[in-house]
Image (cartoon, helix red, strand yellow):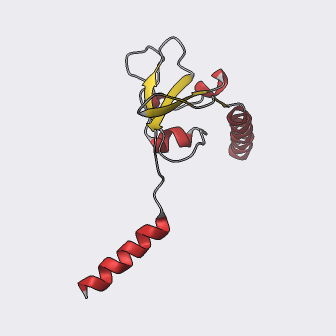
Amino acid sequence: MASSQTAQQLVAQKEAARKLEEYIEKIHYSDRYSDDHYEYRHVILPKQLLKMIPKHYFCQDDSGTLRLLEEHEWRGIGITQSLGWEHYEVHAPEPHVLLFRRAKNYEPPNPQAARSKSAADASRRK
């Protein structure tokens, strides 16, 4: 009995993973638009994906609206975009639309330059 139940759970998990991957492929990323300080974009999640997001990602007021998500959280639900973006706003009438922004002249960190600076700092300390 237990092995049958385990097999059913495994099948259910595989099906959920397949659906999740299918929904992630349907995430829509808007073109970028900007003002004097920021560039913006909105990300539209398939409504089915919204139903699979962990409950603790939502506001606790039962509005069905996502709270502002940290980068590791929005990346964890399948949103992929370059560095520097922050989830800065929610739109309650459309909880599946996430609004992002980043500084207009954002420069991603240069790991090689950071390593060179660390090495130079270390040699000066010797």
Image location (x, y in percent) of residue 42: 56, 27
Q: Is residue 88 above or below residue 104?
A: above
Image location (x, y in percent) of residue 50: 59, 25
Q: Nearer the viewer, residue 30 or 92?
A: 30
126 vs 91, left or right, is left
Q: Nearer the viewer, residue 7 or 38?
A: 38
Q: Nearer the viewer, residue 19 or 109?
A: 109
Q: Residue furthest bottom?
A: 126
Image location (x, y in percent) of residue 4: 74, 42
Image location (x, y in percent) of residue 10: 71, 44
Q: Residue furthest left?
A: 125
Q: Residue furthest top?
A: 93
Residue 7 quadrant: top right
Q: Quadrant of the N terminus?
A: top right
Q: Residue furthest front?
A: 36
Q: Quadrant of the C terminus?
A: bottom left
Residue 27 quadrant: top right
Q: How many marks?
A: 0
32 vs 109, left or right, is right
Which residue is pictured at 54% across the width and 42% down the height?
75
Q: Is residue 46 above or below residue 4?
A: above
